[in-house]
Image: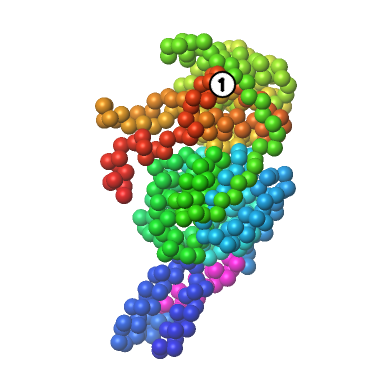
Amino acid sequence: MKQKLQQLEQLVKDTMLADQFPLRRRLQNLRRNKEIKPEQLGALEKQINKSVALRALRQKQIPKPTFENDLPVIDRREEIAKAINDNQVIILSGETGSGKTTQLPKICLELGRGVAGLIGHTQPRRIAARTVATRIAEELKSELGDIVGYKVRFHDQVKADKSYIKLMTDGILLAETQNDRFLNQYDTIIIDEAHERSLNIDFLLGYLKQLLPKRPDLKVIITSATIDTDRFSQHFNNAKVIEVTGRTFPVEIRYRPPAGNDDEQRDYDMIRGIVEAVDELCKEGQGDVLVILSGERDIRDVSEALRKHHPPNTEILPLLARQSAAEQNRVFKTGVHRRIVLATNVAETSLTVPGIKYVVDPGFARISRYSVRNKVQRLPIEKVSQSSANQRSGRCGRVSAGIAIRLYDEEDFKNRSAFTDPEVLRTNLASVILQM
């Protein structure tokens, strides 16, 4: 009987990562029993063999990704693959358009990751998790939900036996730590857009740091466009840093500050400034325009102003997180007419809208802040940081040389903070402590 238990213990090493801990615990419980019932041993052996067979099948069916050479990340593919193999944690900084979000999971897949456990890939927003999953599934020539699945609040499109890559919001991964404390269902975790420093991302970075010594087989990749690589590297004990250049075409920055001072006048001048900027860009030549605004109300006002102004042969497309999937997908289909996409800052980092040649940046965003005086969490409209402004202008250097019009002056840009404050510095810490 002891020999049988030893054989089963050896087999456990070839099971799925998520099964290994409960199977080992059942083996230990059997060892403690003075009398082992044959049916108990048979049931355990059946469970182990089932998990071993699933892992072997996944290894056999692992997809072979193909890569297009027009993305900067692909030029450094071998270097990135070697770094992932040789290090438990890597920090990858890639400018907007370098291809890091879509190509990193495929590089991990090529290395044989994703077989014993999933390749988990987090995004700060639900719309980004869904669209990135769709894009990677298209590149791997599979249906969404098969090789590549996604999980957001109210939607779970992941098949436990078929999926290799799982896109999700960072909130979903954080919630999973309550039931899966060692994140055993994953063999690789990619934290994307880490520069946003939301509470969820900061929690995950802290959680992963204390988890890594207990999970030596787990690979962690932290990636972003405007990441402070030194600080992130120090946090993970001087982790390996790789920097990839992104923008392939030059971007001309033009400053067009409006004249208004008070809020109402500023709103009016901002709308007028956007209309004038769109006119100026339409005279430059063909290409779609992306206008990044601070909220739904601004999108509605600017949309109405542009429709009244009616630039010739244009289609005005709002992009909001609470739109239906069908409405959001309209933005990703290019047509014969020039498109003017009006988006919140979801288009700054999380989504790449195809065909964008021009960007209009009013320089504002809604940033969550805790008001100590009123004891409430607020969403005031504030000036964006330099890194966010650069991220926005970088959206138009993807298909050809682009032009970004900033509706503020250069002095204003230079006086802004280099990075956005982490959310933990501007939120009510009572909820943070309760969550911990």
Q: What residue is rendered at 49% in x and 41% in y?
A: 195
Give the image location of residue 375, x and y in percent: 26, 30
Please tell me how many numbered marks the rendered image carries.
1
Asked if residue 242 shows in the view, the reply is yes
Which is nearer the eye, 178 or 241?
241
Question: Along the horizontal axis of the image, is 173 left or right of 68?
Answer: left
Residue where numbered disc 1 is placed = 410
Q: Quadrant of the N terminus?
A: bottom left
Asked if residue 121 shows in the view, the reply is no
Q: Main secondary structure of the magenta part?
A: helix
Q: Is residue 348 magenta?
A: no
Q: What residue is rendered at 56% in x and 64% in y?
A: 115
SS label for mark 1? helix
Q: Is residue 306 above or below residue 119?
A: above
Q: Is residue 299 above or below residue 221?
A: above
Give the image location of residue 104, x and y in percent: 60, 51
Classify 10 Å Cα crowding around label 1: few (below 14), some (14-19), many (20 and above): some
Q: What residue is rendered at 72% in x and 32% in y?
A: 400
The boundaries of the magenta stretch are 43-59
Instruction: Identify the coloring.
Output: rainbow
Give the image location of residue 93, x and y in percent: 57, 45
Question: Along the horizontal axis of the image, is 93 left or right of 369?
Answer: right
Q: Is residue 268 above or below residue 144?
A: above
Q: What residue is rendered at 53% in x and 33% in y?
A: 387
Question: Along the horizontal axis of the image, is 186 left or right of 428?
Answer: right
Q: Is residue 57 magenta?
A: yes
Give the image location of residue 327, x and y in percent: 55, 32
- The image quarter containing residue 433 is top left
- The image quarter containing residue 334 is top right
Q: Give the residue type at disc 1.
A: Glu
Which is nearer the eye, 389 or 18?
389
